[in-house]
Image (cartoon, helix red, strand yellow):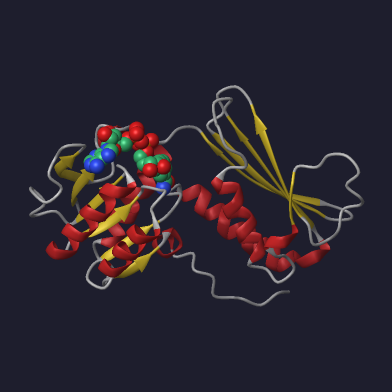
Amino acid sequence: MSDNLSVVICGYKGRMGQTLLAMAESENATVVSQKDMGDSLCDGLDGAQAAIDFSFHSATVELVETCSEKGIAVVIGTTGHTEEEKQRILACTQKIPVVWAGNYSIGVNLLFHLTETAARVLGDRYQPEIMEIHHQHKKDAPSGTAINLAEALEAAPAFNESNRVFGREGDTGARTNEEIGVHALRGGEVIGEHTVFYFGENDRIELTHRASNRSIFASGAYRAAHWAAKQAPGLYNMRDVLGLTQTDQEEV
Ligand code: NAD
């Protein structure tokens, strides 16, 4: 069990913020300050070892810049930053450790790693297809995680971005070995499911992650905060946190 961690939660009134507050004790963290819209992001941070931010992209910049002055590690959960915001955040990584990930689920990050590893091992002898399922309310498709899975496949020499095929309809012609099929299903209240299929001539491999609730993101964010508080200044992602950085780049 890691030492207790003093944290600041930014965006605490939101869905993720409330989940983070509810899980603090079980994640071995003490919330020394909680912030939301209208609060000063500069006050009350003394004594904190890490800040976890699931507020809004524009607030993230102010929080990270304040933390860089105070030497506090930051875990960035927000998405949708502008180019200027990204540059200002990156500048702070000279002074403090920052973990920045589009998805904090430990299981999904493991799925990225396994997807890439399988693609390297299987090469173009297997044909990959990605399928994601989300609830009926989701307004965009495919999911960002499905795109990240395509990127994981594209780390293998056999595949690249120009070969993504989103859904299939009509006179598509035969499937080529280079294609990465991406398919979105919508219905019910499914929180999020992602499967990568590798179709071979004589067998089929399937890697699946199924989310049950958003506590998986909060749990991953706490793990990132515990880890970040002990790191040197720099920019890190969840692969670094989980020790999943690919070292064997050779295709079999
Ligand atoms: P939410 O809308 O429920 O909560 C956001 C909270 O931030 C609200 O309480 C809001 O009042 C607060 N907020 C907004 N502007 C603020 C400001 N200027 N200063 C301080 N607080 C401010 O949203 P959510 O579902 O909890 O998601 C929050 C963010 O986290 C989004 O950007 C979402 O995309 C992202 N997210 C990321 C992951 C991941 O794994 N990286 C997972 C879930 C959500």
Image coordinates of residue 200 in percent, x first then y, are 84, 55
Q: What residue is shown at x 34% (from left), y 49% (from top)?
A: 221
The quarter in which the C terminus is drawn is bottom right
- Is residue 22 something one can see in this rendering? no
Q: On the rendered structure, is 184 left or right of 84?
A: right
Q: Residue furthest top?
A: 188
Image coordinates of residue 61 in percent, x first then y, are 26, 55
- Is residue 161 something one can see in this rendering? yes
What is the tally of numbered marks visible in this picture? 0
Please state which of residues 40 and 150 is positioned toward the viewer in this rendering.
Answer: 40
Q: On the rendered structure, is 92 left or right of 135?
A: left
Q: What residue is shown at x 43% (from left), y 58% (from top)?
A: 238
Q: What residue is shown at x 38% (from left), y 48% (from top)?
A: 220
Image coordinates of residue 5 in percent, x first then y, are 19, 52
Q: What residue is shown at x 23% (from left), y 57% (from top)?
A: 64
Image coordinates of residue 241 in percent, x first then y, are 39, 61
Please state which of residues 181 and 105 is positioned toward the viewer in this rendering.
Answer: 181
Up/down of 195 relative to 162, above or below: above
Q: On the rendered structure, is 249 left or right of 123?
A: left
Residue 127, picture quadrant: bottom right
Up/down of 137 relative to 145, above or below: above
Residue 226, picture quadrant: bottom left
Q: Quadrant of ligand 1?
A: top left
Residue 195, picture quadrant: top right
